[in-house]
Image (cartoon, rainbow, N blue to C red):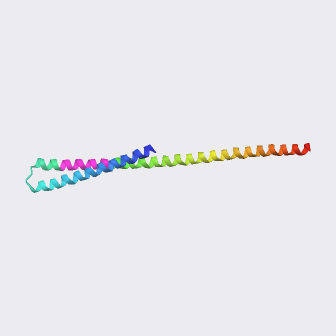
């Protein structure tokens, strides 16, 4: 259960990181477009585009990490479901065992009472 919570937190963090990178990309793209209206040197233009490509690469990397985290979360959910089924199965078996013990005790008690009744009847 703790691993599941941790996985959800990881996904949330990655999604927030992706959002920040997208905002940064949009900001720099707007700055790049604004800067292109002014006379820029070739080096400044290359720097803007290079930085934008780096941001895009980071966004893609976060997307890959996000997919891995979602896959891991699905695996954890499957494991938790299997563990829950096993727990329910064990509880059911325990309840059945306890019921059998109670029934056996009740039968022994009934036999003892029957035997005592037969002895009292025979003593009369």
Where residue 113 appears, as percent x and y from the top left, is 81, 45
Q: Is residue 90 visible?
A: yes
Q: Nearer the viewer, residue 124 or 52?
A: 124
Where residue 45 appears, as percent x and y from the top left, is 13, 50
Q: Which residue lies furthest to the front in this view?
A: 124
**In the image, what residue occupies the spot 29% across and 48% down?**
17
**In the image, what residue occupies the spot 15% across and 56% down?**
33
* Total numbered badges shown on the rendered structure: 0
Q: Residue furthest left?
A: 39
**In the image, what residue occupies the spot 89% across and 46% down?**
121
Q: Can residue 68 be seen in this view?
A: no
Q: In the figure, is residue 53 to the left or right of 105?
A: left
Instruction: Assess whether residue 88 is covered by the magenta stretch.
Output: no
Instruction: Assess whether residue 59 is covered by the magenta stretch.
Output: yes
Q: Nearer the viewer, residue 81 or 46?
A: 81
- Magenta stretch in the rendered image: 49-62
User: Overall secondary structure of the magenta stretch?
Assistant: helix
**In the image, what residue occupies the spot 15% across and 53% down?**
32
For the C terminus, which image quadrant? Answer: top right
Where residue 28 appears, as percent x and y from the top left, is 18, 52
Where residue 38 appears, as percent x and y from the top left, is 8, 55
Q: In the figure, is residue 88 to the left or right of 60?
A: right
């Amino acid at each position: 259960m703790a691993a599941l919570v941790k996985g959800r937190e990881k996904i949330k963090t990655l999604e927030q990181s992706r959002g920040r990178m997208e905002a940064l990309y949009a900001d720099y793209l707007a700055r790049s477009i604004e800067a292109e209206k002014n006379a820029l040197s070739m080096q400044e233009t290359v720097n803007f585009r290079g930085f934008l490509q780096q941001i895009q690469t980071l966004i893609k990397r976060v997307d890959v990490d996000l997919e891995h985290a979602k896959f891991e979360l699905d695996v954890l959910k499957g494991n938790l479901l299997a563990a829950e089924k096993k727990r329910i199965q064990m509880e059911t078996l325990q309840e059945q065992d306890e019921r059998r013990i109670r029934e056996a005790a009740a039968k022994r008690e009934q036999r003892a009472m029957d035997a005592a009744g037969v002895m009292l009847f025979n003593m009369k």
